[in-house]
Image: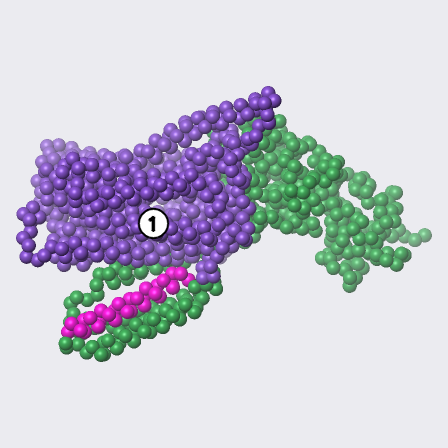
């Protein structure tokens, strides 16, 4: 029942108790009429008043909401019932009536007492309501990798954790998997160190051949094993080169659990995994959610460090409905920098010099966007009253500007108007690994005008 | 045992075993043959042939294949690949706001729950009573020559039960109508989808109801006319078999809707029907749920009849009445406990199938959000065993000669308490961080060991074994064993029970040293030990009663009040537990109407807290018993009318005087 509604149990019981009050009244009247020496007016009056009180209480119960009903029931109704029972007993004793209460009433009280005690027991236990997971998680394009990883953690464990109990999120992973070293419930593999294992596993013979060879399709899901470039369109990694990586293995494990079954954890001679396909019902993670889980898996063993995360942050395309047609040209020709390149290479690959003048980078003399003197400018812009972003220092400002260029549009003092909004691409989150982004932010936040002269 | 002479044991045991065989065999046989062989091959081959023909026709240019083929969400072909079938229905709807209606006074889900549960309670009762009547009438026929008075008593009991059942039958139909209208009006979108798939099943169901009603009326109203002629009496008894068969088919058909919702088959991922209605009916949980419900019905029916008799025992005015209802209490409890003992094993089978369907569904039940409900179930089962043993102990005390065994009662109670404590120990409990720190982890360092399945299996098997032992002692409490092999027999019984206990405990301890996947396998030998005590122990015990002397007959009508209230406790526990398990089975779908196919998009798609669920269960229990009281009262009006027909002063026929 909803909090604003009446509680069905207490409503039922209040009706039943009023029924009992009138039964007791009728029973007393009957005994009084059978016997001449009984003070009918007195006893009839007492039980009549008690029945009316009980009736009024029942009427009152219909005006109360659930929580109020419980309080009222235990405060007043129970008291009235107790007084009726006591008076009834006194009546029988004082009049020396051997017949006493009929078995129906005794059975009724036995029944209600046992049943209500059972209900009480269930209310004494820890209470946890489980709401259905949201159908689609809103994609925030300003998301940092830390937030993205946190999103993955929530999918795994749920937003609220109850101490002493592993709470379970939309992904339902903790039902079977464990994540800490030495913790093994024996249902599915412990995922501690899965990031490193994923990288080595794809080179193992068993992975290459069991339960079927690379390049073959899993009959249940249709996923072609070991072929990241053939992953279902809606789940394919942006900017994938076709080379099998640990990230691809993790994605494959989620979308095709039977493509590889860890020894001792499968059925039919470890050829079939009991794990559900995470991209299908009932769990049905979207591409972004799936990537968030992978990002969490890649970083969970190194809290606060995201260097191992290779999965891209959500893009504008991810925010679009899943049914939307893929962007023209597909995603295969997209740029991606890993962070192992030199800063010049990175900046040139990303195309920054086309619009920006960047001190220290040869040939970076673009004029469409602001000149990047961020060591000094960034802090001034944060202090600008028109700044609405979240950054508090230069590095955060630069990171925000790269991932969400629209957060603050710089005013072009020479032209007397702001630089054009929307010109800068919003897809850098997919073009940069975490390491690359950090490297870029470190560099740009230190850029300053060259010394005059 | 049920009568006054030991010769009834064989007839009763034979009858019960026969009844179980009749009702369980179709379920097991269907599961073994139909699901694996028939579904796995015949349909697969048929579907494959059709698909190939269609492809060949297309390749030969005879036309484009008009039929779209899709993969079944559950059924597999002989190679383990998803079975294909022709798309023959619409995809499952994406339900929206307009697909749900509601009243202001209560959430639709709660109203549907109440309607459903009340119908199920009554349905369970009216399906169980004909089973009892069949057995009791059969025993009555068999004992007619050897003991005509007891035979008449059995016949009268069966007739009385049918009379109550007849009123309850109409009530069940009314509740079914309420349920149907509740479903249509509050969940129209979902009902439309279900009706689209189960259309023919629903019509067959309605027709079967007609057949059930016809046979029921002939069976009941023909009772007196077919009573005296031996041949007609056998025909009459055969009608009860027919009645039960139709009733079982009815229940299985209705079960198919629920089991489809929980673990669908015969449709593709989009929820489109793939043309084979048998696949939709015969989804993976159909058979275990069917068998579990048959046993559950017997237990529940026994509980209701027991409570009915116990109440009449308390209100009885004459010694004869008290003796009669005391005896009925015993018969009802005997049947209920006989159904209760195999019930956990049917439950194991059901859970095994749930795990086989989706492991995470099984874990949600046993280790996820539903896990606490299983702790409550454990408490309820503990209550049942306490109630059953308490009744047996109290009943035993009025049997002459029972003093020899009463001294063991306290040890059995002690064992039950220890096992019960172990049985209800949770694996982990929800705690505050401070509590967690103090305890050093989510599991208690000592008590935590009792929270795992090894300990629980051991505890419950010992509790069942203890109940069996208590029952055997009850059986022999007034007997002076005379067979020459009495000592050997006693040694065998002792060896069976001691051996079983040692085996159960040893396997329980051994389980701690095995990994989880191997540990699961230990439950089978543990259960086998328990069943051995039940079947072998009972068989040896009964065999030893041959030519036995008696300390004296059971003094019916002297049952203590504690024993009577123990029956009430059993009746409440059965009702509450039945509601609880029904809720667990249904709620494990979480936010799906049909698991993984039709999502529940109503505002009520959440999973209730345990407390909310507990209150609903208590309400449903009290509400259904209120209705039972009304139904019994209505049935009693007919009895009073008939009784009034016999004018006072008319001599009682000689046969009845006996």
Of the pair B319 and A390, the residue shown nearer to us: B319
Side (left or right) of B234 relative to B622 = left
Which chain does green denote in the image?
A: A
Question: Residue at left 28%, top 42%?
Answer: B214
Residue at 14% from the left image edge and 57% from the top image edge: B644
In this picture, residue B39 sits left or right of residue A22: right
Residue located at (80% from left, 49% from top) = A423
Q: Position of residue A283 (x, y in %)?
A: 54, 43
Q: Report the residue marked by disc 1.
A: B173
Q: Main secondary structure of the magenta part?
A: helix
> Residue A191 in the image: x percent, y percent?
55, 40
Q: In the structure shown, which secondary structural element does the residue marked by tag 1 occupy?
A: helix
Residue range corresponding to the magenta coloring = A7-35
Residue B118: image x %, image y %?
35, 52
Q: Is residue B49 visible?
A: yes
Residue B506 image position (x, y, % from top left): 33, 37
Q: Residue at x 44, y 35 (%)?
A: B277
């Amino acid at each position: 029942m909803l909090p604003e509604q009446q509680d069905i149990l207490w409503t039922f019981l209040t009706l039943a108790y009023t029924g009992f009050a009138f039964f007791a009244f009728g029973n007393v009247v009957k005994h009084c009429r059978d016997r001449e020496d009984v003070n009918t007016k007195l006893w009839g009056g007492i039980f009549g008043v008690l029945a009316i009180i009980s009736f009024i209480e029942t009427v009152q119960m219909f005006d109360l909401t659930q929580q109020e009903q419980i309080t009222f029931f235990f405060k007043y109704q129970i008291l009235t019932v107790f007084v009726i029972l006591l008076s009834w007993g006194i009546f029988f004793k004082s009049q020396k009536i051997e017949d006493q209460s009929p078995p129906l009433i005794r059975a009724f009280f036995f029944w209600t007492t046992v049943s209500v005690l059972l209900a009480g027991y269930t209310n004494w236990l820890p209470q946890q309501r489980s709401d259905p997971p949201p159908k689609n998680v809103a994609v925030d394009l300003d998301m940092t990798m830390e937030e993205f990883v946190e999103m993955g953690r929530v999918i795994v464990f749920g937003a609220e954790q109850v101490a002493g109990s592993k709470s379970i999120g939309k992904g339902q992973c903790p039902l079977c998997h464990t994540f800490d070293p030495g913790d093994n419930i024996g249902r599915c593999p412990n995922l501690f160190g899965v990031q490193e294992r994923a990288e080595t596993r794809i080179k193992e013979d068993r992975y290459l051949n069991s339960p079927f060879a690379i390049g073959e399709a899993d009959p249940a899901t249709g996923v072609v094993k070991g072929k990241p470039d053939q992953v279902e369109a809606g789940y394919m990694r942006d900017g994938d080169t076709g080379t099998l990586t640990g990230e691809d293995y993790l994605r494959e494990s989620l979308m095709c659990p039977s493509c590889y079954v860890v020894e001792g954890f499968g059925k039919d001679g470890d050829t079939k995994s009991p794990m559900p396909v995470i991209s299908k019902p009932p769990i049905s993670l979207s591409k972004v959610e799936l990537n968030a889980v992978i990002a969490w898996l890649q970083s969970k063993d190194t809290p606060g460090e995201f260097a191992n995360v290779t999965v891209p942050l959500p893009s504008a395309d991810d925010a679009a409905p899943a049914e939307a047609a893929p962007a023209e040209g597909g995603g295969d020709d997209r740029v991606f920098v890993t962070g192992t390149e030199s800063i010049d290479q990175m900046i040139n690959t990303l195309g920054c010099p086309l619009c920006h003048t960047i001190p220290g980078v040869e040939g970076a003399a673009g004029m469409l966007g602001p000149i990047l003197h961020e060591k000094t400018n960034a802090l001034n812009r944060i202090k600008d009253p028109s700044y609405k972003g979240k950054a508090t220092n230069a590095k955060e400002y630069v990171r925000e500007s790269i991932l969400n260029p629209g957060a603050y549009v710089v005013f072009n003092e020479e032209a007397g108007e702001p630089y054009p909004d929307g010109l800068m691409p919003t897809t850098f989150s997919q073009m940069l690994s975490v390491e690359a982004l950090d490297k870029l932010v470190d560099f740009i936040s230190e850029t300053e005008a060259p010394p005059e002269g | 045992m049920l009568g006054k002479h030991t010769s009834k044991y064989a007839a009763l045991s034979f009858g019960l075993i026969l009844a179980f065989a009749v009702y369980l065999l179709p379920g097991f046989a269907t599961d073994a043959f139909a699901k694996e062989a028939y579904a796995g091959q015949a349909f697969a081959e048929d579907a494959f042939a059709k698909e190939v023909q269609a492809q060949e026709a297309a390749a030969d240019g005879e036309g484009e294949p008009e039929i779209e083929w899709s993969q079944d969400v559950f059924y597999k072909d002989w190679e383990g690949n998803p079975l294909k079938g022709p798309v023959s229905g619409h995809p499952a709807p994406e339900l929206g706001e307009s697909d749900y209606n509601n009243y202001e006074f209560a959430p639709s889900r709660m109203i549907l729950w109440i309607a459903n549960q009340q119908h199920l309670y009554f349905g369970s009762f009216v399906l169980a009573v004909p089973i009892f009547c069949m057995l009791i009438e059969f025993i009555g026929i068999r004992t007619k020559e050897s003991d005509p008075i007891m035979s008449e008593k059995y016949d009268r009991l069966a007739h009385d039960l049918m009379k109550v059942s007849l009123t309850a039958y109409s009530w069940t139909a009314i509740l079914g109508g309420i349920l149907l209208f509740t479903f249509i009006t509050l969940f129209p979108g979902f009902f439309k989808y279900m009706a689209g798939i189960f259309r023919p099943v629903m019509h067959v169901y309605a027709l079967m109801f007609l057949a059930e009603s016809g046979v029921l009326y002939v069976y009941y109203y023909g009772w007196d006319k077919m009573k005296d002629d031996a041949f007609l009496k056998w025909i009459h008894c055969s009608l009860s078999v027919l009645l039960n068969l139709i009733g079982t088919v009815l229940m299985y058909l209705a079960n198919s809707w629920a089991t489809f919702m929980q673990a669908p088959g015969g449709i593709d991922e989009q929820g489109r029907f793939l043309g084979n209605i048998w696949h939709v009916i015969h989804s993976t949980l159909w058979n275990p749920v069917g068998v579990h419900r048959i046993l559950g019905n017997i237990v529940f029916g026994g509980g209701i009849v027991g409570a009915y008799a116990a109440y009449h025992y308390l209100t009885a005015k004459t010694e004869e009445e008290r003796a009669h209802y005391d005896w009925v209490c015993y018969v009802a409890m005997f049947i209920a406990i006989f159904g209760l003992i195999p019930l956990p094993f049917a439950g194991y089978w059901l859970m095994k199938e749930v795990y086989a369907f989706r492991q995470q569904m099984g874990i949600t039940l046993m280790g996820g959000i539903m896990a606490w409900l299983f702790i409550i179930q454990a408490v309820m089962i503990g209550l049942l065993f306490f109630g059953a043993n308490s009744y047996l102990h109290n009943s035993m005390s009025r049997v002459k000669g029972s003093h020899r065994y009463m001294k063991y009662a306290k040890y059995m109670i002690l064992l039950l308490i220890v096992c019960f404590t172990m049985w209800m120990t949770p694996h982990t409990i929800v705690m505050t961080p401070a509590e967690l720190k103090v305890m050093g982890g989510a599991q208690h360092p000592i008590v935590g060991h009792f929270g795992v399945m090894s300990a629980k299996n051991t505890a419950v098997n010992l509790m069942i074994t203890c109940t069996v032992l208590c029952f055997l002692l009850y059986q022999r409490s007034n007997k002076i064993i005379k067979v020459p092999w009495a000592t050997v027999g006693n040694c065998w019984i002792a060896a069976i029970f001691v051996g079983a206990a040692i085996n159960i405990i040893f396997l329980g301890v051994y389980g701690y040293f095995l990994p989880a996947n191997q540990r699961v396998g230990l439950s089978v030998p543990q259960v086998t030990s328990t069943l051995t005590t039940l079947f072998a122990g009972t068989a040896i015990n009964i065999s030893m009663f041959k030519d036995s002397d008696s300390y004296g007959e059971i003094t019916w009508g002297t049952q203590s009040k504690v024993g009577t209230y123990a029956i009430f406790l059993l009746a409440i526990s059965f009702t509450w537990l039945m509601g609880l398990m029904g809720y667990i089975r249904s709620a494990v779908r979480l936010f799906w109407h049909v698991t993984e196919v039709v999502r529940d998009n109503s505002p009520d798609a959440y999973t209730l807290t345990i407390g909310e669920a507990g209150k609903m269960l208590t309400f449903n229990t009290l509400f259904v018993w209120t209705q039972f009281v009304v139904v019994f009262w209505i049935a009693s009006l007919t009895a009073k009318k008939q009784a009034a027909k016999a004018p006072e002063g008319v001599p009682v026929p000689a046969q009845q005087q006996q």
